[in-house]
Image: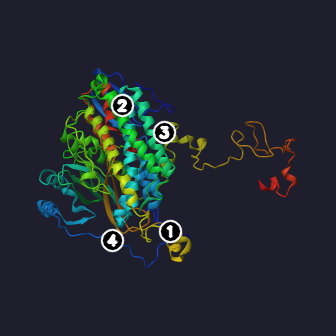
């Protein structure tokens, strides 16, 4: 039977994992810092889980409350900068995205990461009215994962072309691109009918075209530029320079055989 | 209207002469002062910009996608291609994030060398900023002078790691090499000459009438907007907010070093230019302290954590177990613990941070590169409105965006 390859995650995987190996976990610390405690208190019920992981306070919230939570963080806790918004794809395992907002308090030099889970197909409320930096960040999130942000002023693809199909950072999207990606330019410029004429993109830098006499020539079978050799070519005797008088074909190393 | 057919497809919906007498023009992506691959669609009323739309993605290589398909060590040279003007800061930010994730202590000599490289890179990057910014604004000679200085600094980088632009001089867990003989002496010679060169640039520019006319009160950014747009680095300090990650959230040796954070209250391009000049002087100060620190360190360069980082070559060649661990690390890659980390660093452009989500596999489950230039490009859509087209070039130059980092 052929080996089954999962289609829901086509990213790089370890080819071997010890069956007894259990991955350790980065310790999640209880919130002890005074400032962080105040943050958790200010948010109250809306925080589902709070812990400190590597200097960052991580707050798990409900995806519907993202706007209210960030508003409280901005207005009462002093988190005036939203330095990053992005998502993690957990569609294969849990059927949802994890969206995180990386917040920064400039006065206290503290960082909070607000994390929420969003089911596939749902949209999240845009935080552009609070943080203008979310404008580009949410557009990138939409471009890369297809997560829509409601009430975003201009939700449009940002890094990929506007007419692109698929969202590149999904786990189902292969690194080399899908079929659409490989024919994108051909389809767009010439039309799908030209796929056969133009042929697939050559991604092998060392590829040799056997019958292409424009760019390649065969030792011992040289022909003039752009000759049609599909019917075979005639052997040309190799002429060696008379000054050196070296005929490699007579030595132990046969040029013909090495070819 | 544009006539479309299969060979000249209807790529963009652009009408050059419109009913409302506004003109829409494309600034870039081939414009020499568009800093690489920025396409800026500007709507103009005469010479006044009424709308600006930065269109990015012309240099998108999917570096975050590549990170999910590469082991942690494999990915490190790829980070060079983010901010290619100061690649050590990218290497370092990535290495630091992974080190925080696995909880590594880096030997002191490696820390000294790393901080030296970071600061030397800051000088290189700021000189590049000065050169291109002055060239954009119209001061040709500064470009030649600043590039000459930058060449000497890049020679120092080359002496250390063999590369001039894509250094990969930092490894996860330390640095691969010790400083070569005579490197510190050369660095001292370079640093001794630097202040008089900076003074020369300032003599040429700071009081120059044309320079002041082009930069003063151009690209004004209020502190509220700077925070709201997620600005960092000089863009933030240029608006009067004294926030430098090296001081506020110190990493590496910055907590032990003595340096000042210059800030500017003028909120304009001229203020930012002055900050860049001052930061170069501060980098020189830091480097001089590091030169003194270097001889007091032990010779160890890589952290000892055989589970994650290969043992020194000598041990691999003599001890069987070290060889086995090295083999596993090379063929499978290191497996950091499960968890997530976000580590900010102060790159020459601003806050460069790496968010890494690890599922305990040799491949990162998700890696997000928080690039300062990305957010500074987003800012352009607001800051350019209401300025004149001649100032557009100044403002883009002043934001100091690098497109390797914007598009990733």
* Alpha carbons under labels 1 and 2: distance apart: 58 Å
Does the image show residue A145?
A: no
Residue tagged by mark 4? A25
Query: What element does badge 3 sit on?
Result: helix
Residue tagged by mark 1? A15
Residue A227's place in the image compared with A150, above or below, is above
Determine the chain carrying the residue at label 1. Answer: A
* In the rendered image, residues at marks 3 and 4 fall on the same chain: yes
* In the rendered image, residues at marks 1 and 2 fall on the same chain: no
Does the image show residue B9?
A: yes
Q: How many neighbours does mark 2 have within 10 angstroms: few (below 14), some (14-19), or many (20 or more)?
A: few
Question: Comparing marks 4 and 2, which lies closer to the viewer?
Answer: 2
* Alpha carbons under labels 1 and 4: distance apart: 22 Å
At horizontal 36% and vertical 69% (from top left) the residue drawn is: B337
Determine the chain carrying the residue at label 2. Answer: B
**Tag shown at residue A188:** 3
Query: What element does badge 1 sit on?
Result: loop
Indicate left or right for B37 with A192 as reference. left
Q: Could you tell which of marks 1 and 4 lies nearer the N-terminus?
A: 1
Residue A170 pos. (x, y %): 39, 56
Colouring method of the image: rainbow
Question: Could you say which is closer to the camera, residue B3 or residue B382?
Answer: B382
Indicate left or right for B110 with B382 as reference. right
């Amino acid at each position: 039977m052929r080996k089954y390859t999962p289609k829901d995650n086509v990213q790089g995987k370890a080819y071997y994992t010890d069956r007894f190996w259990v991955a350790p976990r980065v310790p999640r610390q209880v919130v002890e810092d005074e400032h962080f405690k105040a943050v958790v208190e200010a948010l109250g019920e809306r925080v589902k889980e709070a812990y400190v992981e590597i200097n960052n306070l991580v707050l798990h919230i409900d995806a519907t409350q993202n706007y209210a939570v960030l508003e409280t963080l901005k207005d009462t806790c002093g988190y005036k900068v939203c330095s990053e918004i992005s998502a993690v794809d957990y569609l294969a395992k849990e059927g949802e995205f994890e969206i995180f907002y990386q917040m920064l308090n400039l006065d206290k030099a503290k960082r909070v990461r607000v994390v929420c889970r969003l089911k596939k197909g749902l949209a999240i409320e845009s935080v552009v009215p609070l943080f203008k930096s979310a404008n580009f960040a949410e557009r990138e999130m939409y471009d890369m994962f297809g997560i829509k942000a409601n009430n975003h002023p201009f939700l449009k693809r940002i890094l990929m072309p506007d007419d692109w199909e698929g969202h590149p950072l999904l786990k189902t999207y292969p690194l080399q691109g899908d079929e659409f990606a490989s024919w994108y330019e051909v389809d767009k410029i010439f039309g799908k009918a030209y796929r056969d004429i133009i042929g697939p993109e050559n991604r092998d830098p060392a590829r040799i075209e056997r019958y292409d006499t424009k760019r390649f020539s065969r030792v011992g079978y040289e022909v003039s530029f752009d000759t049609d050799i599909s019917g075979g070519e005639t052997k040309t005797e190799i002429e060696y320079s008379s000054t050196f008088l070296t005929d490699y074909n007579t030595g132990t190393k046969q040029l013909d055989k090495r070819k | 209207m544009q006539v479309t057919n299969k060979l000249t497809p209807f790529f963009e919906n652009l009408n050059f002469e419109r009913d409302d007498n506004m003109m829409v023009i494309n600034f870039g992506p081939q414009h020499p002062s568009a800093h690489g691959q920025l396409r800026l669609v500007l709507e103009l009323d005469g010479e006044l910009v009424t709308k600006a739309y930065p269109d990015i993605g012309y240099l998108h290589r999917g570096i975050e996608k590549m990170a999910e398909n590469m082991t942690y060590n494999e990915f490190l040279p790829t980070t060079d291609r983010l901010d290619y003007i100061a690649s050590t800061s990218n290497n370092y930010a990535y290495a630091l994030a992974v080190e925080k994730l696995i909880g590594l202590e880096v030997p002191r000599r490696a820390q000294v060398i790393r901080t030296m490289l970071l600061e030397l890179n800051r000088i290189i990057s700021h000189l590049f900023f000065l050169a291109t910014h002055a060239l954009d604004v119209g001061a040709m000679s500064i470009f030649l002078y600043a590039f000459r200085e930058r060449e000497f600094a890049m020679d120092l980088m080359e002496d250390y790691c063999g590369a001039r632009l894509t250094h990969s001089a930092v490894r996860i867990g330390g640095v691969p090499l010790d400083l070569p003989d005579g490197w510190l002496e050369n660095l001292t010679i370079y640093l001794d000459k630097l202040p008089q060169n900076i003074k020369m640039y300032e003599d040429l520019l700071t009081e120059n009438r044309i320079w002041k006319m082009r930069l003063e009160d151009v690209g004004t950014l209020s502190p509220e907007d700077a925070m709201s747009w997620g600005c960092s680095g000089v863009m933030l300090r240029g608006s009067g907010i004294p926030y430098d990650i090296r001081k506020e959230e110190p990493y590496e040796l910055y907590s032990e070093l003595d340096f000042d954070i210059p800030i500017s209250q003028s909120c304009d391009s001229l203020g930012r230019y002055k900050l860049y000049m001052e930061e170069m002087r501060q980098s020189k100060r830091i480097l001089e302290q590091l030169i003194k620190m270097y001889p007091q360190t032990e010779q160890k360069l890589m952290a000892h954590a055989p589970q994650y980082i290969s043992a020194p070559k000598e041990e691999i060649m003599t001890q069987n177990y070290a060889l086995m661990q090295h083999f596993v690390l090379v063929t499978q890659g290191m497996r950091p613990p499960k968890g997530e980390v976000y580590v900010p660093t102060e790159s020459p452009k601003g806050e460069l941070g790496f968010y890494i989500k690890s599922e305990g596999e040799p491949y990162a489950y998700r890696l997000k590169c928080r690039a300062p230039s990305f957010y500074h490009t987003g800012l352009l859509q607001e800051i350019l409105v209401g300025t004149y087209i001649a100032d557009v070039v100044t403002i883009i130059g002043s934001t100091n965006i690098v497109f390797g980092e914007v598009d990733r």
